[in-house]
Amino acid sequence: MTTFRPQLEQVYDGVLIPDLKGALEHKTTETRIEHYNNKPYEVEDIISTYEHVVHTYTDFNDGFENIYLYKHMALHEVYHQLPVHNPKINSSSKGNFMLMPEFIEKKDNQYLFKGIGITRSNAIIENQEGQFSVVSLDCP
């Protein structure tokens, strides 16, 4: 249950996803320096601010990271948004359905999930303000 009104979007034949992000309010691009193997790399973040979510997309050339910071949502609401960002569909004789990432473990403030497909890691992280982020790293 949620107090947020979802926007239902069809992602596959008969499969709808409940998207809670709301209307797009602002979009920016920021550049920063990341160090990897003691070498500096310029990284570009695309930040999209919605009514209920701030989405940061970062392209690392050989992979990309998505961070969805949910404003004013509880853990159970954020958990049910896990498959919304990168839906994986399974088809069977009983119909089509969306796969939920498999829970691995809780470590400190992180709930870790097994990746599906090109998703190498998937986590829900609680920050110091009690807000939750969905963080995924995808590498084709």
Image (spheres, helix red, strand yellow):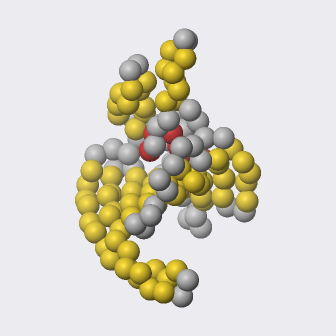
Where is 3 relative to 112, above or below?
above
Look at 59% across and 54% down and name the residue there.
Answer: 121
Q: Residue furthest top?
A: 93
Q: Position of residue 20 (x, y in %)?
A: 41, 41
Look at 46% across and 37% down and name the residue there.
Answer: 87
Q: Position of residue 13 (x, y in %)?
A: 38, 21
Where is 60 relative to 136, above or below?
below
Determine if residue 77 is in view: no
Q: Is residue 139 left or right of residue 5?
A: right
Q: Position of residue 117 (x, y in %)?
A: 54, 43
Q: Nearer the viewer, residue 39 or 83?
A: 39
Q: Nearer the viewer, residue 101 or 38?
A: 38
Q: Is residue 23 left or right of residue 115?
A: left
Q: Position of residue 65 (x, y in %)?
A: 46, 60
Look at 33% across and 44% down and name the residue there.
Answer: 22
Quarter of the view holding residue 80:
top right
Quarter of the view holding residue 63:
bottom left
Q: Is residue 28 left or right of residue 79?
A: left
Quarter of the image with the N terminus is: top right
Determine if residue 107 is in view: yes
Look at 73% across and 59% down and name the residue there.
Answer: 107
Looking at the rendered structure, the number of numbered marks drawn on it comes to: 0
